[in-house]
Amino acid sequence: MKLCRFNGGRLGVAHPERNVVVDVSAVLDRIAPQRYPLPQQDLLVASLPSLRGHIEDAERHGQSLALDSVVLDSPIANPGKIIGAPVNYADHAAEGQQDKGIAHGRQIPPIGEWGMFLKAGSSLVGFGQEIELRFADRRNDHELELGVIIGSTCRRVRRSEAMKHIAAYCIALDMTLRGPEFQCFRKSIDTYSVLGPWLVTADEIADPGALDLELKVNGVVKQRSNTRDLIYDVPRLIEFASSFYTLNPGDVIMTGTPAGVGPVKPGDSLEVWIDKIGSGTVRIAPDYVPANEQDH
């Protein structure tokens, strides 16, 4: 099942092969209301096991809309954490050593030594929003990644048990400002975490370690790889992350990017595709406001 959020928070079942989304927003009324303090999780993802049958029923009677007529929001509304996996493809590690603009002169340790990092929830957008470059006078890179959505609360998970804690997968863009600052700071700029175009429930992807992926900038292929080349595969990433953090429903793990990262500029178009998930286009806003003029 492909689930999307669109037009400001409506819920739909996407059928990209038919260019259709079926509105099943009425199902959201079945999510139990919450009071302060709110749980540190995404309520839709947490409720998904009990909602699935209701979603299937609602789809039989829901309004069908042209997929290209709606604005796709991030398929996760409230992730408690967006977790990044730095340098998790060997070819990207190699290009980082060769291209000094990537690491800004730093030595890049392996993921097992460097660990993972967090991106701010305020950086999150969907495929229907534009990426707004905050520092267009500096290098801003695209990084295509497989996104893993956690489905149940877990901690200190063994690799052998990790897959049962996955709710869904999606395409992720870990947009990155290059420079001297900590990566969690440079990667947490507003609109620099892109998820979409929809969630593909875990039952539709038997092996997340065998997915082709590709990114084009203005029609030119820049990144092309397969998740079999991950240094830490999906189960190992869940094991690693959960050894430090409690993972909750809706938490996102961006699994790392392969070689081919490179700069984008205002007005660029990013076409992204991952096998068994689908494809979409994300645009870089044509204009930007210099950082020292923002919010004035």
Image: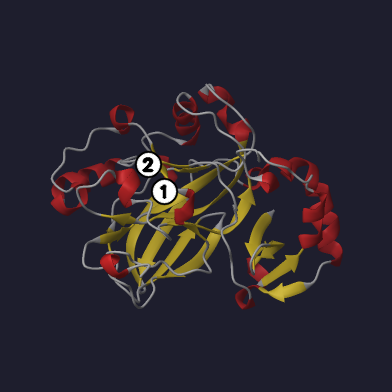
| Residue located at (51% from left, 65% from top) | 127
For numbered disc 1, what is the local secondary structure? strand
Q: Are marks 2 and 1 in contact (CB under 8 Å)?
A: yes
Q: Is residue 82 left or right of residue 268?
A: right
Residue lying furthest front: 296
Question: Residue at 64% across / 72% down in the picture?
Answer: 67
Res 111 → quadrant: top left
Residue that badge 1 annotates: 226
Give the class, few, some or many, for how many residues have Cα within 10 Å of label 2's Cα (few <14, many ≥20): some
Q: Could you tell whether 256 is left or right of 264 in the image? A: right
Disc 1 residue type (three-letter): Asn
Question: Which secondary structure, mark 2?
Answer: helix
Q: Quadrant of the C terminus?
A: bottom left
Q: Which residue is mark 2?
A: 229
Residue 223, position in %: x, y? 34, 58
In screen coordinates, is 34 left or right of 250? right
Name the residue nearer the viewer: 34 or 156.
34
Query: Could one spot residue 165 in this view of the protein?
Result: yes
**Spot occupied by residue 17 in the image (x, y as percentages of width and height):** 64, 68
